[in-house]
Image (cartoon, rainbow, N blue to C red):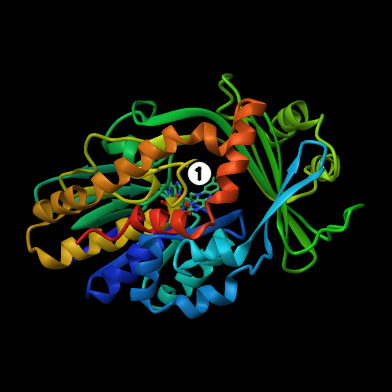
Amino acid sequence: MKVIIVGGGIAGLTLAYWLNKNGNEVQVIEKASELRTEGYMLDFFGPGYDVAEKMGILDSLQRIHYPISGLEFRSEDGKFKYELPYPSLRHLFNGRHFNFLRGDLEQVLYGLVKDRVDFKFGLTINDVQQDDNQVHMKFSDGSRGTADLVVGADGVRSRVRSLVFGDHHNYIKHMGYYTAAYIIENSCMSKPLNNAFYSLSSPELQASVYPIRGDRSATFFLYKSSQKEEHLFREEAINELNHHFKHMGWVVPELLDQAEEASDFYFDEVSQVVMPQWSKGRVVLVGDSCQAVSLMAGQGASLAMTGAYVLSRSLQESNDVKQALEKYENDLKPQVMKTQASGRKFAHYFLPDTRWRIIIRDVTMRISVLPVVRRFVNMNRARIPK
Ligand SMILES: Cc1cc2nc3c(=O)[nH]c(=O)nc-3n(C[C@H](O)[C@H](O)[C@H](O)COP(=O)(O)OP(=O)(O)OC[C@H]3O[C@@H](n4cnc5c(N)ncnc54)[C@H](O)[C@@H]3O)c2cc1C
C-alpha cells in the first residue's frame, strides 16, 4: 500500500516507522525546511513509552533524557518552597519515565526512518480529492501525488483536516490558557541554576526554567487569559509575557529580557482537538490533528506515538482500509477522551487560579510521591489499547 503522511512530527515519524516496517511504501510531506530543533521539554511516560520499547529505542531515549535532580517549587518572588526529588517522581511511573526535548525525540525517530522513507521537506498540500480506491493530492510546489491512504499528522492546526473535514474552528477547543517556551543560548543568570526544573507560581501564572546541555536554559510560561490571542507575532507575544509576568522576581526578569534573542520561540493558546470522526474515506488523522489532549493533560507526545502504532497495527490486521480506520478510532478514542476530560478537570490544579488553590496544589504534589499514592497513579496509567 502507498501511504502519504502529511507532517513529520512525533506522530508522523512514528507512523512512518511502523508502516515501513510492515512493508508499505511511505512518503512524508513536511512543511518545515528541515526537522525542527529542540522546542520544549516533554514529560514522557504512559503508552508512548511502551510503543518506544516496541521500537527498540529506549537506549536512545535514555541518551537524550535530562536527569534533573528534581522539581523545585518557588513563590512568585523566587523564594524556595519545596523540592520533589526526581527519583521519587520517576518511581510514580515504575521508572518508565523520561524528560527530553521534543526536537531530540524527533531526531531519534527520524534516525530510524530517514534512509527507508521518502521525505519531502519544505512542502505542503493544497488540495485533496478521493475516489473509492485512491487519494489524489496537489502539493504547494505544483506537483501532484496519488496514494492508497493519506494521513494528516500535521498537528493542532492540521491542513489535511481543514481540507477534508472543514474549518478548524469546529474542532479546536481553546482552554483559556496561553503558553510560551524558548531557549536561551549561553545563559548566564545572576542566580546560579543547579540541575533542577524550577517553577514559580502565582495565581493564574507559572514561569519555569531549567538548564539544558551546552550552557543553555529552557523556559516555559503558562498563563490564564480570557482574551483571544490566536495569531500573535513574536514581538506581540513577548509583550504579552512581559505584561503578565513582570511582577515576578528571582530570574524571571532576566528570562523575559532575553526572549527577543532566544531560539526556538514558541507561543500558542492551549487547546484540545475534539472530532466526531477521525477518518473520511481514505484520509485519516493521527496525533494532535485529531486527538490533542493539551499540556494540561500531559501525554500528548505519548498518545501521538500510541495513535501511530495503533493505526499501523489496524492497517496490518485488516485488508479493508475502511474497517481498519474504524477499528483504530474505536480502539484509541475512549482513552483519548478520558485523558482530555482529565485535562479539562485538572487544569485549575495544573495552574491554580487563587492563592488557596496554590496551597492545595502544593500539598497534593508533596504527598503524590508517597507509596500509597504511587499505587493509585499506576492503576490509572493509560495503556496501549489491546
Ligand atoms: C509547551 C508544550 C508542552 C508540552 N508538554 C508535553 C509533555 O510534557 N508531555 C507530552 O507527552 N506532550 C506534551 N506536549 C504535547 C506534545 O508536544 C504534542 O502532543 C505532540 O508534539 C503531538 O505530535 P504531532 O506529531 O501529532 O504534532 P506536532 O508536534 O504538531 O507535529 C506536526 C508536524 O506537522 C508539520 N506540519 C504542520 N502543518 C503542516 C502542513 N500543512 N504540511 C506539512 N507539514 C505540516 C509540522 O511542521 C510538524 O512537524 C506539550 C505541548 C506543548 C505546546
The image shows residue 7 at horizontal and vertical percentages of 41, 54
User: Can you tell which quarter of the image residue 206 is in?
Assistant: top right
Helix, strand or loop under label 1: loop
According to the picture, the residue beneath numbered tag 1 turns out to be: 295
Nearest to the observer: residue 374 or residue 238? 374
Q: Residue at x 47, y 48 (%)?
A: 298
Q: Amino acid at mark 1?
A: Leu
The image shows residue 100 at horizontal and vertical percentages of 58, 63
Q: Residue at x 30, y 40 (%)?
A: 337
Q: Is residue 34 visible?
A: no
On screen, residue 143 versus residue 298, left or right, reads left
Mark 1 close to ligand 1, CB under 8 Å: yes
On screen, residue 109 versus residue 21, left or right, reads right
The outermost residue toward the right is 190
On screen, residue 123 versus residue 386, left or right, reads right
Q: Residue at x 9, y 53 (%)?
A: 323
Question: From what the image shows, is residue 267 above or below residue 262?
Answer: above
Nearest to the observer: residue 221 or residue 71? 71
